[in-house]
Image (cartoon, coloured by chain):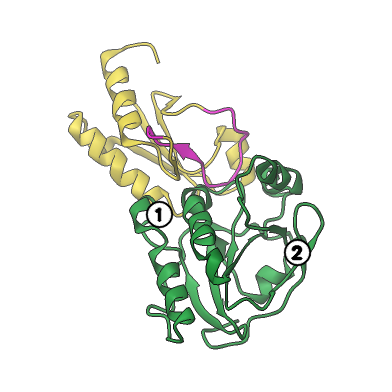
Amino acid sequence: MISIGDMAPAFRLPDTAGEPHGLEGAPATVLVFTCNHCPYALAWHGRMLAVARDYAARGVQVVAINPNDPTRQPKDSVEHMRGRVAAGELGDVPYLHDETQEVARSYAAKTTPDVFVLDGAGVLRYRGALDAPYDDEAQNAAWVRSALDAILAGRDPDPAETERVGCSIKWRAS
Amino acid sequence: MRVELLFWDGCPSHPRARAELEAEMAAAGLDPRAMVVTEVPTDEAASDEGFVGSPTIRIDGVDVQPTEEPAGLSCRVYRLRDGRYSPTPDPADVHDALRRAMNGAPR
């Protein structure tokens, strides 16, 4: 179980073209466990992309990770991920496939979406939702933006944790 | 009129769907207590019921937002009338479905 203040687990995962990605030493990193099939993930998706666009100039890295088992949810297959990337739905955000689900487990991710914000040292500084409620786009990912602004200014995010709302991660049958 | 709410407990959207359905029933002059609420707990039950995701609302057996999605346990994706994705149907769609059924209009 990873907690606020812990070093975030390192990882290498492939994007939809097979290129590996990990924590790249950015001044702040936003990891979003997300997927293709979940209405909550889709409802918040545009706000995730807006964060990536708005903070790119400040060096913030935003990464989307699909942890779901496609045998349980076929829309979360790599093929469907590629389709969304090809359609431009991910913008410049790399969309990674956590086939073994080890990364999701190492972060104790529970839902899609589930957001983790790390500082430049790779320490977990915020965990939860982009904002709330999911159906109010005017919230504009306020909690994640607040966390990023705090991290980039050398302050502690407040709040550091918020309630995650979304679809349960579709774990492989054990 | 038979108003059904089917849900899977693995998806957190059903309390909101139920509240909105109750409100639309009341606004239409129907007793919300007449709603038939059914939990769909397994893939087998989903297949048997033709349950295409949670929540599903049927008025006299007709889905308020028909879909070609396969049966299964998942959170259902709805589109609101303004195009946004949502885990619950647009209340206006529920309202219209209730009115059509009350008026005996084809659906």
Q: Which residues are magenta?
A: B67-82
For the point 38% across and 32% down, which residue is it?
B81
Q: Residue at x 63, y 34 (%)?
A: B70
Relative height, residue A129 to residue A86 (above, below) = below
Does residue A9 belong to the magenta stretch? no
Chain that bears disc 2: A
Q: Residue at x 45, y 63 (%)?
A: A130
B95 left or right, relative to A164: left
Return the residue at label 1: A134
Q: Residue furthest right?
A: A18
- State the green chain: A
SS category of the residue bearing label 2: loop
Apparent colour of chain B: yellow
Quarter holding the N terminus of chain B is top left
x%, y% of residue B43?
Answer: 63, 44
* B38 relative to A52, above or below: above
Marks 2/1: CA–CA distance: 32 Å
In percent of width and height, residue A102 lies at 73, 70
Q: How many numbered marks have been drawn onto this rendered protein structure? A: 2
Foreground: disc 2 or disc 1: 1
What amino acid does circle 2 point to?
A: Ser
Query: Mark 2 = which residue?
Result: A174
